Image: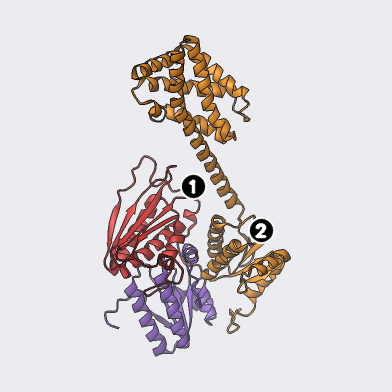
Amino acid sequence: MALPGESILASRGAKRPALTEDRRPPAPATYPVRTEEDLLSVRHAVRAATVEVGFGLVDQTRVVTAASELARNAFVHGGGGTVTLEYPRDPRGRRGLRLIVKDEGPGIVDLDAALTDGFTTGAGLGHGLGGARRLMDEFTVRTGPGEGTVVVVTRWLAW
Amino acid sequence: MTGHRSPGVPILRLGDVLVTGLLNELDDRAAIAFTEELTERISAEGARGVLIDISRLEVIDSFVAWTLMELTTVARLLGARVIVAGMRPPVAITLVELGIELVGVETALNPEQGLAALGWRQAPQPLEGARRGTAR
Amino acid sequence: MSTSEAAVRERLTRALQERGEEIADRWVELQMEQALLDTDIGEAELREEADALFEALVPGLQSGVPVDRVVTSTPGLHEAVVGLSMRRARAGATPTATSLAVLALKEALLKAVQRDTRDAEELFASAVFMNRLLDVAGALSFETYVEGREEIIRRQSQQLMEQSTPVVRLWRQVLAVPLIGTLDTARTQVVMENLLQAIQDHEALVAIVDITGVPTVDTAVAQHLMQTVNAVRLMGADCVISGVRPSIAQTIAQLGIDLSTILTRGTLADALAAAIKLIDGPGPDGDEGDGR
């Protein structure tokens, strides 16, 4: 007997009609990352947002996982911060979901090293930044010693 | 060891095999509590095998992955073999893209095959009922 | 300047209203003549485009919108330009032909103005005005064309990708996916998604990835293969790669790519034999087997 795990069939190649042309995208929303419970709340919010945009199940999982990595980074290394969700459209009208993860922590001293797999200054695998970059379509970081860190990642809906 | 919060799935014993699972709502503290509880039980009951059903997990980030790897290593040191069963396809794809291979962690398609690999023979009739109870 | 611009607008409007037919004829003729349209867009369609464009151009000229924004901000006009560019993109016209089509309109318009006036200054002012007006249209047209082509390419490659990665069931609990062509990131994602879902649906224990149809294996392809194998393993199934030709084996060795942890076979038949052995033989650890 197979487990009654949800089939991903429904999401494969299915262009969900969510967020149709005439519907306005939701307003950006910001969530705090101050406690461990907040990490779960962020995950829920991001999951709901991916469904809203119309991502398939694999893309939903990619985005929620990236959010989890980045929010944890902000929580563990940045001493807490915020996650903001935005619903951008690219010039061609393609919909997407953007996460802006901010913290006022010590900042990242060696960004290249932080983007390298296996690099970590805390518990875990050190896949946070580099992993999130691979899971998303666009990735930018603004950071510096004592300046805190802002990571902006975007995933676009496939055509 | 204080302030345990149950990860929600009881640890059951089938002979020398412990069977348990992880729920989707798994925060860091629950993950750590789960590791500690399972480790204690392996040691206390001299378990030779551990089956962890992860078919409910919709997301495995690097922290959960790290927890599973650590658990596998600790269990091995205590003489038990861990099998993680039922990973969802989107989770497997995401983990691979994340760059995590779950080094050293044995996997099975579902709990049945995991149990078979741990030495449980399938005797369909009696096991059919037991199976439902243990996998969840 | 502004009075003369008003005059120019007035003159062009009148030309379009009174000689619309003639301008359209000339424009269509120019496009046919330049043999710019190596497509099946016919004369009738070109006429329709012209009519739609002129209809929207008149209110645009009459509005007070600055000349270089007329095309982009007049309702109907923007759509007309985008529409004709999209049609050319879909019909397979060259990008040069597409933007020249819009620019040929300048010539047709100027010709019409010339019939109304011989005044050099006025002709010059008209020409300058039309340049500013239609250069925007040319640019918009080119941009639309490029987008249109990109969209077509994306759709086609997506379709091709989904059609060219069938997962077939070879044996009880053995699946195979024959790969044909290059294995890039997007393709790998489709293959993984289809394969993993099929593994779950069929409770398959072994997945064979056949690379007979993959022309070359470089580091990137090898990495994508590794990703696929790892994802299959995370699901709890085994993966065999088949169709490794001698030349590919050599390349892999020369590149120093480590595929040592992966079971590989030369042919699909050998891979199937290996897969069946994996399922029916003693368990991979040799301890308990699967009890059958």
Residue B53: quarter of image:
bottom left
Chain label for disc 1: A
Left or right, C159 with respect to A79, comes to right
Q: How many marks?
A: 2
Image coords of residue C108 (percent x, y): 52, 18
Q: Secondary structure at mark 2?
A: loop
Near-viewer residue (B18 or C29): C29
Residue at the disc numbered 1? A159
Left or right, C94 with respect to B111, comes to right
Q: Is residue C282 above or below residue C116?
A: below
Residue at the disc numbered 2? C214
Q: Is residue A99 above or below residue A39?
A: above
Q: Amino acid at mark 1?
A: Trp
Q: Amino acid at mark 2?
A: Val
Q: Secondary structure at mark 1?
A: loop
Apparent colour of chain B: purple
Image coords of residue C93 (percent x, y): 59, 33
Chain label for disc 2: C
- The chain coloured orange is C
Q: Residue at x 38, y 65 (%)?
A: A69
Residue A101: quarter of image:
bottom left
Residue found at the far front of this picture: C121
Q: Residue at x 35, y 77 (%)?
A: B32
Between marks 1 and 2, how big is the CA–CA gap?
A: 26 Å
Image coords of residue B3 (percent x, y): 26, 79
- The chain coloured red is A
Q: Are marks 1 and 2 in contact (CB under 8 Å)?
A: no
